[in-house]
């Protein structure tokens, strides 16, 4: 029993969130259309997901009136923000209780002041098109879309509540988003405690002996 209590205590200590916090932005090129299986995305934006307000779900893959175009590599519907689509737009992710990583396609990235602004609500971080490409000129082809990954650490994992998209010109487009939630401490404790019990059971099994009696 004592060994089990020690294991659970260790699990609780393991899940403590460090005081320091940071958000790491990683930008990868999208070289092929359909960069991943659409079935694996948390949000495809074929329909409006719960928590997303403002902006517009665009059902077509082609550019509409020159205002917006689907991010290269995406498929089906996508999300667009701008004067004609609505700006700013907010994606409330607070119900997840914490996020460790978000990745998505950022299409036709434009670095002009106010064109593409992404704010991480609940944190001190904000990014614009110039943080993604240099130069960021709004190109709609393969060289104008980025696979953007935001990695959260420390307190920012739980203080983060959502994304805000803003654009003072058409348009700011995103698609194919994956969100990794932070497991709750109880979940971690159960997992690690379970591993401890399995190890204890295996240890006891290895110590067992077979007795043979001869008549």
Image (tube, rainbow, N blue to C red):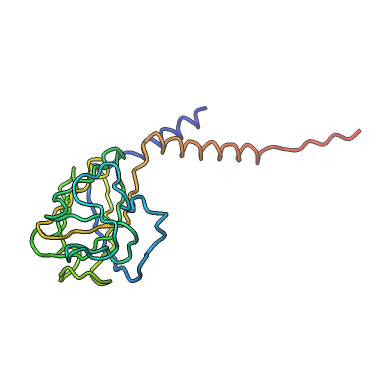
Residue at image coords 41%, 36%: 187
Give residue 142's position: percent from left, percent from top: 28, 71
Give the farthest residue toward the top: 1
Q: Residue furthest right?
A: 215
Please state which of residues 151 and 47 is positioned toward the viewer in this rendering.
47
Pick the residue in front: 168 or 106: 168
Q: Quadrant of residue 147?
A: bottom left
Residue 9 sits in quarter: top left
Residue reaching furthest front? 65
Is residue 13 found left or right of 117 in the rendered image?
right
How far from the left and from the top, in percent, is residue 169? 11, 60
Left or right for 206, reference 157: right
The image shows residue 37 at horizontal and vertical percentages of 42, 59
As rendered, which of 18 and 124 lies closer to the eye? Answer: 124
Left or right of residue 6: residue 173: left
Say above or below: 119 vs 141. Answer: above
Q: Quadrant of residue 39?
A: bottom left
The residue closer to the viewer here, 105 or 181, is 105
The picture places residue 91, in percent across and down from the top left corner, at 23, 46
Check the image and report above or below for 213 versus 141.
above
Which residue is outermost to the left? 113
Number of marks: 0
Quadrant that contains the C terminus? top right
The residue positioned 61% from the left and 40% from the top of the image is 202
């Amino acid at each position: 029993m004592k060994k089990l209590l020690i294991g659970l205590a260790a699990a609780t200590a393991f899940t403590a969130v460090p005081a320091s916090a940071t958000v790491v932005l990683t930008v990868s090129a999208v070289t092929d259309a359909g960069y991943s299986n659409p079935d694996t995305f948390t949000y495809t934006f074929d329909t409006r997901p719960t928590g997303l307000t403002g902006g517009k779900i665009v059902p077509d893959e082609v550019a509409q009136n020159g205002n917006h175009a689907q991010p290269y590599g995406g498929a089906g519907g996508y999300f667009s923000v701008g004067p004609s689509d609505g700006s700013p737009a907010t994606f409330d992710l607070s119900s997840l209780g914490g996020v460790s990583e978000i990745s998505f396609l950022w299409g036709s990235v434009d670095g002009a002041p106010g064109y593409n602004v992404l704010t991480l609500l609940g944190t001190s971080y904000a990014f614009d098109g110039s943080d993604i490409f240099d130069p960021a000129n709004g190109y709609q082809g393969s060289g104008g879309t980025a696979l953007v990954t935001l990695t959260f650490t420390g307190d920012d994992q739980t203080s983060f509540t959502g994304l805000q998209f803003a654009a003072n010109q058409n348009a700011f487009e995103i698609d194919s988003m994956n969100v990794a939630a932070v497991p709750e401490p109880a979940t971690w404790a159960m997992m690690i405690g379970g591993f401890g019990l399995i190890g204890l059971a295996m240890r006891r099994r290895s110590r067992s002996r077979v007795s043979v009696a001869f008549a």
